Image: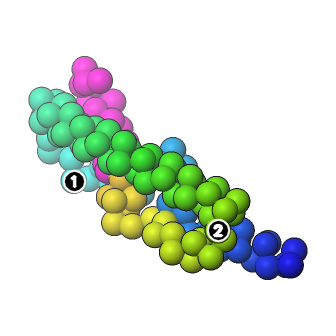
């Protein structure tokens, strides 16, 4: 019985969506922004950060929902754990890429001594 509980807990944890704070950014080259003016860098950074903020909220809610479903499933009805949607999907991949883009834009901004924040 203990073995079953351990296996189910491991399955439940692996099926949960990651918290957006734990998603690592993808590596993005600064080369694509090398010809951007400071104004263009600022506008692109605003666009990227806006989408990052939207995705952060969406991914946080999904992660919190999965955690709550797992807790209820473990306490009340463990077979429900098999139906957890969970996992990291395309939104998490987009989030990681956009975090990398924001980082690349910030590095180009520093290199060009732009006053972007």
Main SS of residues in magenta:
helix
15 horizontally vs 97: left or right: right
Find out whether residue 100 is within the magenta segment. yes
Q: Which residues are magenta?
A: 97-117
Q: Quadrant of the N terminus?
A: bottom right
Q: Return the residue at label 1.
A: 32
59 or 77: which is nearer to us? 77
Q: Position of residue 2 (x, y in %)?
A: 87, 74
Q: Return the residue at label 2.
A: 77
Q: Quadrant of the C terminus?
A: top left
What residue is rendered at 37% in x and 62% in y? 93
Q: Quadrant of residue 90?
A: bottom left
Question: Which marked residue is nearer to the observer: mark 1 or mark 2?
Answer: 2
- 35 relative to 72, above or below: above
- 88 relative to 96, above or below: below
Cα–Cα span, label 1 and label 2: 51 Å
Q: Regarding mark 1 in the picture, which secondary structure is present there?
A: helix
Q: Position of residue 9 (x, y in %)?
A: 71, 68
Q: Regarding mark 2 in the picture, which secondary structure is present there?
A: loop
> Quick check: marks 1 and 2 in contact, CB under 8 Å?
no
Q: How many marks?
A: 2
35 or 20: which is nearer to us? 20
72 horizontally vs 55: left or right: right
What residue is rendered at 14% in x and 34% in y? 43
- Which numbered dot is residue 81? none
Indicate how the structure is coloured in the image: rainbow
């Amino acid at each position: 019985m203990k073995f079953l509980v351990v296996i189910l807990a491991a399955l439940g944890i692996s099926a949960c969506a990651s918290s957006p704070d734990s998603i690592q950014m993808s590596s993005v080259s600064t080369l694509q922004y090398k010809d951007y003016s400071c104004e263009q860098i600022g506008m692109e950074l605003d666009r990227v950060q806006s989408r990052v903020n939207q995705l952060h909220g969406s991914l946080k809610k999904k992660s919190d929902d999965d955690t709550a479903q797992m807790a209820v499933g473990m306490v009340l009805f463990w077979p429900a754990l098999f139906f957890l949607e969970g996992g990291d999907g395309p939104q998490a991949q987009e989030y990681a890429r956009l975090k990398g883009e924001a980082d690349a834009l910030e590095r180009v901004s520093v290199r060009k001594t732009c006053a972007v924040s």
